Amino acid sequence: MDEELREKTKKTAEMLFHTLKGGTGFELWKKFDKNLARELSMFFTGKLYSREVISQKQRELCALAALTVLNRVQEIRAHIHAALNVGATRQEVTEVIFQMVTYGGMPVVVDALTIFKEVLVERGEWEEQA
């Protein structure tokens, strides 16, 4: 296995998901097929998520938009953490979620905002807005 790719995968995963309690999908994948889980992680995290064409913040806001419309609640949680971990502001995350009303409808926006609030509470960053 390519040691450089392994280190890049580990570094990128740590940067994005270090605040996520319970781990990422990788932890579940490993329980079913450890070798395949490693290969998937090396591709997604080591190659795709670490590309430098767009910033990590842009990448995470794009992921959050897509996941909101698809209503993938576990992944929304993971990528909200990741977006905040790479410098997205609370206002940017909120705006991306609200913009998805056009493409996914209000129910998916409400679900994503609910998850966002839960993440902020977990991180000790929740404060009511006036």
Image (spheres, rainbow, N blue to C red):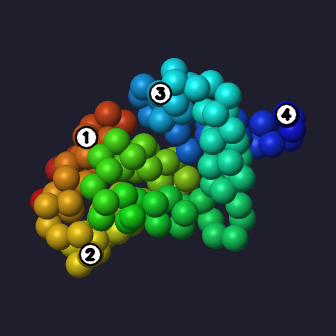
First in sequence, mark 3 or 4: give its number: 4
First in sequence, mark 3 or 2: give its number: 3
Q: Which residue bears the numbered disc 3?
A: 28
Q: Give the CA separation, mark 3 to mark 4.
A: 22 Å
Quick check: marks 3 and 4 in contact, CB under 8 Å? no
> Residue visible at 37% across and 58% down?
67
* Amino acid marked by disc 1: Glu
Residue 114 appears at what percent x and percent y? 20, 49
Q: Which residue bears the numbered disc 1?
A: 118
First in sequence, mark 4 or 1: give its number: 4
Q: Give the CA separation, mark 2 to mark 4.
A: 41 Å
Q: Is residue 91 left or right of residue 6?
A: left
> Residue visible at 78% across and 37% down?
7
Q: Give the CA separation, mark 1 to mark 3.
A: 22 Å
Mark 4 closeness class: few <14, some 14–19, many ≥20 residues within 10 Å: few
> Residue visible at 68% across and 48% down?
43
Quick check: marks 3 and 2 in contact, CB under 8 Å? no
Circle number at residue 103:
2
Could you say whether the residue bearing mark 3 is in a helix, strand or loop? helix
Residue 101 appears at what percent x and percent y? 21, 72
Circle number at residue 1:
4
Q: State the residue lying farthest toward the bottom.
A: 102
From the image, state whether disc 4 or disc 1 is nearer to you: 4
Could you say whether the residue bearing mark 4 is in a helix, strand or loop? loop
Question: Does residue 81 appear in the picture of this structure?
Answer: yes
From the image, state whether disc 1 or disc 3 is nearer to you: 3
